[in-house]
């Protein structure tokens, strides 16, 4: 059992991930029963590929949430990084230059966020909320209402390519999930990050360099958003200034459905991956069954609340 | 933030229009819905060009949060405080905007309504295109091109908005004329590219043999187009707006058609009417643009960058 301020005790991570896997399984069984095409390999790959973009954004966010912080600027970071990197790829025909730009913008935004949170002690949701507006303003001014589109196939492969029948975004997602899980759970830095959120006093007393670790998680969150911007460009072959506004809330939802606590110290990348998968499955199922799209936000909201409720219930029975 | 970005945008547009606005001319406020849709960018450039050629100044107001009615209402307060001489507005929400319009009326500032017709308030004139007709004619072009038979998918806009409702009605009316066409799915993708792509990918799993896709705007059409071409589908696709991106796709043979909604001309005419009204010249109560379905055969006039397009002369404006 882990103690979470404001929530109390929650079951161990492994139990929580297992509970969520069971939820995915049930969802899968229901969809298989209702739709003849759901279980086909092509559709499952399609779902995983759609989940990948969401996972890239919510992976870095998971680390931020582990420190009891929140990064509301991810969507706007994706938008600015995609617009600037997109125009640079168009202008120079160099995918590498574009990639460096997207990741550089992501890391730069993350560094600023991290410094506001750690050095200036501005609450993260305010610092990153302010950053959201700044980045949106920059993206709007930069694009002036235009759309950048039509990228070289070298870039597009990152979004649409396959390796041994598996979509490249899915392969990258698997790699990121493995490396990220190793970092968060097996390294000293990773454990220090969780400790900052779980018990900041103990973290300080045991000599954790809190400020540097905080800056690190926001830089990683920014980098993840910068990478998501590249995948967005590769997938959609275009970008405009406003693409970020519809990306942030699903990313936060994936982290919460994945079992991370906004009070810090609790959360895993595996959980976040499952959270992204559940959100994607809901859309896929609704489209396959031709359910009116207006129900989708409602269902997402119910799932977020249900996921947290299940954790609390697990706490009651696990005592 | 809104004001800063709007001012920055006005500067950019001023540069795009290639003319410096005269500070002693009339000052008209142009309120559009968002920075996202190229349609409104075209509308802003059109208004700026018309105003510049009539030696007036344009103040552009665009919500930072796309389609935010709250922001548009506070922009109206700003316009009134700054005492703009006239207002040209594309309302974000045709019902919720009414109290804002009444405020402008109370401040005795003349207003021209463009694009989406407000459900209340007093206007000098309404300049728009008929969404229902555009959607119907675009859909008819697609349904004819697929030979009047096969499966069709509709990608809807944001439910509850006037444009989405009228376009969906137009699509349905066209479908009713082709009894051998089967509408297999009609799902909203909220005018968004990523959503259109994902919804299309999902629908293609269940309906791989779809013959045509009717998207309620170009952005969704192009998102769906990528999903279709990747799945190896030969489905024909149409959008609405006549955006540059869609015109390029039509030229490349990847998209069949786009219903022309000509934001540039709407912006031109909106600003012209506002200025003519201020100068006590006659103005029509309503201007409805003729519907054009842009295809490979007639795309030449649309294949011109915004800043090189010319506003119609007053004689060319249809006055009805």
Image (cartoon, helix red, strand yellow):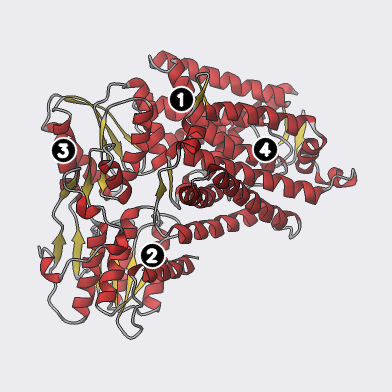
Residue B50 in view of the camera: yes
- Disc 1/disc 3 C-alpha distance (Å): 31 Å
Q: Nearer the viewer, mark 3 or mark 4?
A: 3
How packed mark 2 is, by other alpha carbons closer than 10 Å (few <14, some 14-19, many 20 or more), is many
Is A42 on the left or on the right of B298, as rendered? right
Circle 3 is placed at which residue position? B141
Q: Is mark 1 in CB contact (under 8 Å) with mark 4?
A: no
State whether discs 1 and 4 lie on one chain.
yes
Chain bearing tag 1 is: A
Circle 2 is placed at which residue position? B73
Q: Is residue B108 above or below residue A14?
A: below
State whether discs 3 and 4 lie on one chain.
no
**Dot label at residue B295:** none
Circle 1 is placed at which residue position? A46
Q: Nearer the viewer, residue B246 or A247?
A: B246
Q: Is residue A261 above or below residue B126?
A: above
- Disc 2/disc 1 C-alpha distance (Å): 42 Å
> For numbered disc 3, what is the local secondary structure?
helix
How packed mark 1 is, by other alpha carbons closer than 10 Å (few <14, some 14-19, many 20 or more), is many
> For numbered disc 4, what is the local secondary structure?
loop
């Amino acid at each position: 059992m882990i103690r979470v301020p404001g929530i109390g005790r929650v079951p161990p991570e492994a139990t929580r991930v297992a509970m969520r896997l069971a939820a995915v399984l049930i969802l899968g069984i229901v969809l298989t029963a209702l739709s003849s095409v759901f279980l086909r390999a092509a559709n499952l790959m399609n779902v995983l590929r759609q989940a990948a973009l969401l996972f890239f954004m919510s992976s870095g966010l998971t680390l931020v949430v582990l420190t009891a912080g929140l990064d509301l600027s991810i969507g706007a970071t994706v938008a600015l990084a995609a617009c600037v990197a997109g125009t640079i790829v168009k202008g120079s025909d160099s995918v590498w230059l574009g990639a460096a730009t997207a990741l550089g913008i992501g890391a730069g935004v993350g560094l600023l966020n991290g410094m506001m949170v750690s050095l200036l002690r501005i609450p993260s949701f305010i610092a990153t909320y302010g950053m959201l507006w700044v980045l949106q303003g920059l993206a709007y001014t930069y694009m002036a209402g235009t759309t950048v589109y039509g990228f070289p196939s070298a870039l597009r492969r990152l979004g649409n390519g396959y390796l041994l029948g598996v979509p490249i975004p899915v392969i990258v997602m698997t790699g990121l999930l493995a490396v990220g899980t190793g970092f968060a759970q097996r390294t000293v830095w990773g454990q220090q990050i969780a400790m900052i959120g779980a018990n900041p006093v103990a973290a300080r007393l045991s000599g954790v360099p809190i400020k540097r670790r905080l800056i690190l998680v926001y830089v990683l969150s920014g980098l993840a958003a910068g990478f998501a911007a590249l995948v967005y460009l590769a997938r959609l072959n275009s970008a405009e200034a406003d693409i970020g506004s519809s990306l942030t809330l699903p990313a936060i939802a994936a982290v919460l459905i994945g079992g991370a606590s906004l009070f810090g110290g609790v959360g895993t990348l595996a959980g976040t991956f499952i959270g992204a998968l559940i959100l994607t499955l809901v859309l896929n199922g609704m489209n396959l069954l031709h359910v009116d799209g207006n129900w989708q936000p409602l269902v997402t909201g119910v799932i977020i609340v249900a996921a947290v409720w299940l954790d609390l219930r697990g706490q009651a029975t696990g005592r | 933030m809104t004001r800063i970005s709007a001012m920055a945008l006005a500067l950019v547009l001023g540069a795009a229009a290639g003319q410096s606005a005269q500070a002693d001319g009339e000052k008209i406020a142009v309120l559009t819905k968002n920075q996202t849709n190229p349609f409104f960018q075209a509308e802003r450039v059109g208004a700026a060009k018309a105003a510049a050629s009539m030696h007036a100044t344009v103040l552009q107001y665009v919500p930072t949060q796309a389609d935010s009615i709250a922001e548009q209402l506070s922009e109206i307060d700003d316009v009134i405080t700054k005492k703009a001489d006239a207002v040209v507005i594309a309302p974000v929400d045709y019902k919720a905007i009414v109290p804002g319009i009444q405020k402008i009326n109370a401040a005795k500032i003349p207003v021209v309504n463009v694009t989406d017709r407000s459900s209340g308030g007093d206007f000098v004139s309404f300049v728009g295109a008929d969404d229902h007709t555009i959607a119907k004619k675009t859909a008819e072009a697609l349904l004819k091109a697929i030979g009047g038979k096969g499966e069709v998918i509709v990608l809807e806009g944001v439910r509850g908005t006037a444009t989405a409702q009228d376009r969906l009605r137009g699509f349905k009316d066209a479908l009713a004329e082709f009894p051998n066409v089967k509408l297999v799915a009609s799902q909203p993708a909220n005018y968004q590219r990523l959503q259109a792509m994902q919804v299309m990918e999902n629908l293609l799993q269940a309906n791989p043999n779809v013959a045509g896709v009717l998207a309620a705007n170009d952005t969704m059409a192009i998102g769906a187009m990528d999903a279709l071409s990747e799945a190896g589908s030969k489905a024909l696709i149409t959008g609405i707006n006549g955006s540059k991106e869609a015109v390029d796709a039509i030229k490349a043979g990847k998209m069949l058609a786009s219903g022309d909604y000509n934001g540039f001309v709407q912006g031109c005419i909106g600003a012209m009417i506002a200025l003519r009204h201020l100068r006590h010249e006659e103005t029509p109560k309503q201007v409805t643009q003729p519907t054009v379905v842009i295809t490979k055969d007639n795309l030449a006039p649309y294949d011109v960058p915004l800043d090189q397009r010319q506003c119609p002369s007053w004689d060319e404006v249809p006055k009805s």
